[in-house]
Image (tube, grey):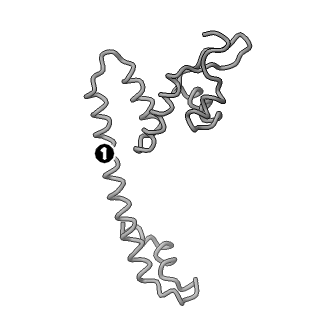
Amino acid sequence: MSETSGLTIGKLASRSDVTVQTIRYYERNGILPKPARTTSGYRIYSERAVRTLSFIKHAQLLGFTLSEIQELLSLRRQPDTSCENIRQRACQKILDVKNKIERLQRIQDALTKLVAKCPGDAPPSECLLVEALENGKSQQLI
């Protein structure tokens, strides 16, 4: 890559709507491949880096962790991988999301019950909500 072709880290960050620190973090952790460098040591990125950062951001919006994203990116680069391998990861993520939603619903129900028991006008030392949290009764509701 010549000195003038490609994107600097600042331009990549701007085009991808991420920070320079985020790009460096992804590089350090192997999520984003290390770029070529100019003779003066500047990082020079290709358009592929823009697409990779877009992939990462959109995968995060769908709830994938950075570890899962790294796995998806790795699968994408393997010639013997089929779409089914990636589909399986997405199906697992659907199950994970469903389980989180169920857990959050139980938490919401428990909090609703606790709040309903709290009269609101008692001093904190007599608060039924605080008492339930202190003696573990809140955990029984979840």
Q: Is residue 124 above or below residue 78?
A: below
In the picture of the structure, the residue carrying the numbered disc 1 is: 94
User: Can you name the residue that lies furthest to the right here?
Assistant: 40
Q: Nearer the viewer, residue 56 or 30?
A: 56
Secondary structure state at the residue bearing disc 1: helix
Quarter of the picture containing the N terminus is: top right
Residue 11: x %, y % from top left: 63, 29
Which picture quadrant has residue 114? bottom left
40 left or right of 69 in image = right
**Looking at the image, which residue is at 41% across and 82% down?**
116
Residue 41: x %, y % from top left: 71, 16
Under mark 1, the amino acid is Ile
Q: Nearer the viewer, residue 92 or 17?
A: 17
Q: Is residue 82 above or below residue 21?
A: above
**Looking at the image, which residue is at 71% across and 10% down?**
39
Q: Is residue 12 above or below residue 100?
A: above
Residue 8: x %, y % from top left: 65, 24
**Looking at the image, which residue is at 27% across and 23% down?**
82
Residue 105: x %, y % from top left: 35, 63
